[in-house]
Image (cartoon, coloured by chain):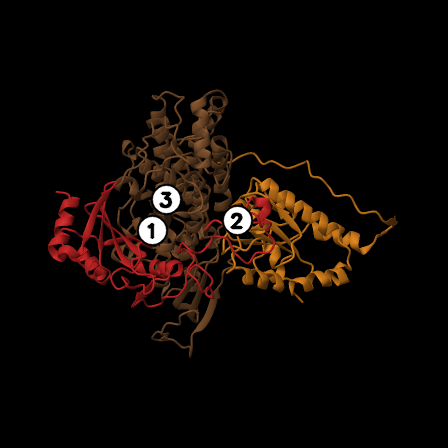
Chain colours: A orange, B red, C brown
Amino acid sequence: MTRPVQFNEKVKVVDIPEGYSGEGFYATSFDKAIGLARKNSIWPLPFATSCCGIEFMATMAATYDIARFGSERMGFTPRQCDLLMVMGTISKKMAPVLRQVYIQMAEPRWVMAVGACASSGGIFDTYSVLQGIDQVIPVDVYVPGCPPRPEGIIDGFMRIQDLVHNESLRRRHSDKYKELMNSYGIQ
Amino acid sequence: MSLTNEQIKNALEAKFGTDVNTFEESFGMMSFHAPKDLNLKVLQFLFDDETLRFRFLTDITAVHYPDRVGEELAVVYHLHNMIDNVRLRFKVFTSIKDPKIFTATRLYESANWMERETYDFFGIDFVGHPNLIRILNVPEMDYFPMRKEFPLEDQTRIDKDDEMFGRGGKDDIVHP
Amino acid sequence: MLEQPNINLPEGSIEKTTNTLNLGPTHPATHGVFQNVLEMDGERVVSAVSTVGYIHRAFEKLAERRPYYQVTPLTDRLNYCSAPINNLGWHLTVEKLLGIEVPKRVDYLRVIVMELARIADHLICNSVVGVDSGAFSGFLYVMQYRELIYEIYEEVCGSRLTTNIGRIGGFERNFTGVAFQKIQKFLDEYPAVLKEFETLFTRNRIFMERTQGVGPISAERALNYGFTGPNLRAAGVDYDVRIANPYSSYQDFEFSIPVGTTGDTYDRFLVRNAEMWQSISIIRQAMEKLKDLPGDVFHADVPAYYLPEKDDVYTKMEALIYHFKIVMGETEILPGELYNAVEGANGELGFYLISDGGRSPYRLHFRRPCFIYYQAYPELIKGSMLSDAILCMSSLNLIAGELDA
């Protein structure tokens, strides 16, 4: 069934960061330019364990397209991805696996805990469920919901984009960050 | 001519006499008890017999009855005769101190993981099972969680403030 | 911890030892968390050991703590792709225990919801089989209609995925006109999309080469392994709980059971597609039958178990007492023991419930079809190539929530 071709004319162009420009050159600071580039091309690693994973599939599909935000390619290997999206319940059996995946990611890396189970154990206050992934890895954004609507996941994603945009280039070498990593036992 | 519960009962009593007892019918399904040493013989009989033909094992699970001293753990088998569309349940009881039951894996392949799950939750040792290790819980776990004496929550949590949930705290009664 | 079976290299192998490949808990393409350690002879699989339990959430122990109406959200999370079937299966079990009989209209509405859930689950399974064999666009075409099904669920119960739909004795609110409009829209638009999906895959040379002969199983082995559902029907056995033990007025509907021959991946794909067509026909029949029934009945008249209307609770004494008793868990539940099964999207989903008359079940066990048929996976892939092993796994429709519970 054919439809007439439609072009999207309402494309929003991002503003350039403030800087000093002249004829043939434009000077700004590195972190603004790098922040802008990074935030619009985040490659997520969907660590989908349970029901929130299905809502993520809906987010990935055509209606709530997450490719608009630059995540066209879902990487499934930690070495190539920036954002670890943990979606679903993490049990105690799975926690070492999650930690291993986090350790294998290259800096800069961000973590988003999608859903109530990943944020805090959710409705499962049992002997076998890890009560929140922040027991094993540091988390940047928590998205509540059981499961969160795709709009919620996209909102979390946009918060991550804000974090990426505003991050200073020296953050990963600062003492505060090292202290955070040490508190989790990650080198 | 479809198979009725009466016929099943008569056939079982003819073969095993008084070993099979406590025939009950609830919601259309018949259930009976058998001694634990005969569980394989009963399963084999129900499989081979040409009128009974219970050739599909629907489920194996266990129940913990702490009040029945000496027979606390019950292993429950659900069987299904697909040709005549009849279901059947039978239970074998074993004591909690020495819970050994013969495995049904030689007859039904599906019993393999079902028995591992039952072992994982209740601690029943299935004699002759090819690979009786924990399946759902972490392998280092040393207790059997579904038994009635163990609690649901993880007791090693330090971040949960029980007072906010209406329990715990120094003045509250501890519920078993 | 892992058992190492006796690994013998097959005849004609040029390798000296087998390779161990870990198809670990983190999979590409959202399959769920379970682990397979494969012993490979080059590209061929010699043996496999499966590990499950990476998402064990202790449902059975949780259910012993909660009153009956609070167990429904737990059942949602079993096979989360088709949550309404699990919910309604649980409600049917409790209604059987308590001897509640629901009116016909409720039965027909339940049938509509369950068949929509079955379509939703088979949609995901078939399109993911397509994705795993390299064809991503089938998934995108068909997910739009899963969004429409989500909208229908939202109209009925308020939630998209983990629906907690219905109550013991019926539904929590009547289906609105908007819900019926959306169901009608689905019935009008979805058949064309399903036809397009089938045209893309069913006679596609590449897809057929990739899926025929992959992971076959004979009917006797399938029965011995405890298969039920589309996987068993693809192997040739026409066992369907909706016909064998009809529940929720399924006997009033006319539908056929599609059956395959070899039980391989291609047959499973075809059986699921055919079942989707049957489900569409069942929903049409239900919509027709609903026209003859009075439109304001949506629950059984059991005030002891079904929460009364809020304005009655605030004005009438009996309604207040019933409300209090139900919420505080003091209603009389009859002691009893029963096993009830419904036809889930993956097979026979059974609920073994023992009640001792108390507020929560004494013992509740879920007979989960995925858990039982996943044991057959090493036998299905023995001797096949690695990519076939992946396709076989995705065609079995393994949902991690149902594996572990």
Nearer the camera: disc 2 or disc 1: 2
Q: Position of residue C114 (x, y in %)?
A: 39, 37
Q: CA distance from mark 2 to mark 1?
A: 24 Å
Q: Name the mark on residue C379.
A: none
Tag 3 subunit:
C
Cβ atoms at labels 1 and 3 below 8 Å apart: no
The residue carrying mark 3 is C344
Tag 1 subunit:
C
The residue carrying mark 1 is C231
Tag 2 subunit:
A
Q: Mark 1: which amino acid?
A: Asn
Q: Position of residue A123 (x, y in %)?
A: 52, 46
Q: Position of residue C261 (x, y in %)?
A: 28, 51
Label 2 crowd (10 A; few <14 / some 14-19 / many >=20): many
Which residue appears at 61% of the width and 57% of the height? A135
Q: CA distance from mark 1 to mark 3?
A: 12 Å
